[in-house]
Amino acid sequence: MLAVVGTVPDPDFPLTVGRVDMVENRLTINGKHVLVNRGTPALLGAMINTLKVLGPKDITGFIAGDIGRGDGSREVYQYLVENKSQIGFHTLVFHYLQPDVDWHNRIMFMLDDLKKKPVLIADAGFMYAAKMSGQAQSYDLFTPDAGELAFLADEVAPHPFYTRGFILHDDNRVPDLIGRAYRHGNAAKNLLVKGATDFIADKSGIVFSVNSPVVEAMEAMGGTGDTITGIVTALAGTGMKISKAAKIAAKVNRLAGFFAKPTPATQVGEIIRHIPQALENVLKESYVQ
Amino acid sequence: MFKLKLFKEKKQDTFSRAELGILVFENTSEVIAAQRILLANDWEIRVMGPPPEIQSGCDLVIEFPLIQELNILRLLEKSGIGPIETVPVTDPLLQPVDLFHIKDFGQFLMIRAANMKITVGKSTQLIVNVSGGGCPDVPYLAFKLVGKTMAQAPNPLEIGHTLCGYALGLAFKEMQKKCSQW
């Protein structure tokens, strides 16, 4: 069982918990519909299309509307803390949520109390809260992009907006930033750094990198980071080792982008549509161990 | 209204230090006026003495939830009481990101500020994509901006709420400068 905790950009979307399905480019959860676009809906769309190849698994969504005021995020946090008995998942991903260390820590206490702790993946706002809380190493995987990696590497920055200039840099310093993030305890057990080259790393350093096919336009497209997080979550949900899941996800996301032939104006739904074809191709590759 | 209240019910002492910022003002009467406005709008704030690293302003500062910096600055500026400086509590010497990464895709130009990117068609000045970020206003801002021209689009500094929205606002401002040169 897989679960996704996140938000949608609709202030009137109430806290909704239930199984998530997708018909064409619309997600349904408890009778409510959400268009697949950047953010948590893109992550969910990518998960569903990944599972079309891997085999069906239920995805439970814990979703609320939030446009940045933090209200919906806090409703989701509160629901999780008060409904611990519902958290019997193999893999749990936290996504676009208002960073809030206090609620983050309450959720970690709740998860620590479970008989079996799920595989924990964090991206976006919840990853920021995880870093600020000093509990990054309780997570199995973070999926930052280059700007977010610089934030993880900056031990004093409370948000990417305040990352110091000498740390903010481009992809050629990614290995240094990964090392710095681990030295300060601000990285999860595994990192999948999304960028011109995707890096899979752990505390020993970079374990794998993926740099082909090159699809430059993806850097400009909103939601391509969300899709990679969705793919790796679905793969991890099958019990696959995180580093292997991350390696496959990086390849699949790139290949889906390649099949979509995007321009910087392409929307993420085009990538999601090509995930099943890309995953089938990647799984056939003999060198993916 | 109910939801906004729910957020604002969070008490200041439930924020960790890393989540707090400081507003620095020119003089004490501005601090008092800002405090009155923020409390009247249900913000959880605290007036306190400045940390030693703050070398400017008066001898009182206002502590506030940092993630909502954009919202709070907008409210104060509307009231004509902008702070002279806004800094994180954990390290008052930190400054907002001022590095812009610019990538030219030929027909399109992308500008990144911190973790936020905006991409615009050069000939049309149409916003074709918004990416990056992790706070919940990012998908909302993208929904409001993508498909509009730079001239039609709302300014993220006016409708965003979080520091990600603020970063997008800076990228947007930089893009406005570029557009004026085309």
Image (cartoon, rainbow, N blue to C red):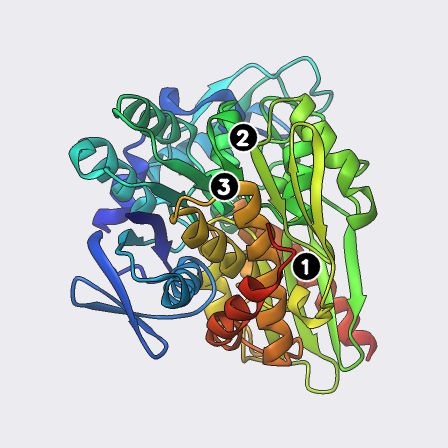
- For mark 2, give the secondary structure: helix
Quarter residue B112 falls in: bottom right
Q: Please state which amino acid type lies under the numbered disc 3.
A: Lys
Compared with A121, A181 (above or below) is above
Residue A241's label in the rendered image is 3
- For mark 1, give the secondary structure: helix
Q: Foreground residue, A202 or B81?
A: A202
Name the residue at 69% across, 20% down: B54
- Which one is closest to the eye, mark 3 or mark 2? 3
Circle 1 residue: B171
Q: Residues within 10 Å of mark 3 (few under 14, many from 20)?
A: few
Q: Please state which amino acid type lies under the numbered disc 2.
A: Lys
Quarter residue A87 falls in: top left
Q: Residues within 10 Å of mark 1 (few under 14, many from 20)?
A: many
Measure the C-alpha gap from mark 3 to mark 1: 38 Å
Residue B45 left/right relative to B93: left
Name the residue at 47% across, 76% down: A273
Residue A46's label in the rendered image is none
Compared with A269, B11 (above or below) is above
Could you tell me residue A168's position as x and y percent? Answer: 76, 42
Measure the C-alpha gap from mark 1 to mark 2: 25 Å
Could you tell me residue B10's position as x and y percent? Answer: 31, 31
Q: Disc 2: which chain?
A: A
Q: Please state which amino acid type lies under the numbered disc 1.
A: Ala
- Which one is closest to the eye, mark 1 or mark 2? 2
Q: Disc 1: which chain?
A: B
Could you tell me residue A64's position as x and y percent? Answer: 28, 53
Residue A159 left/right relative to A79: right
Residue A67 left/right relative to B117: left
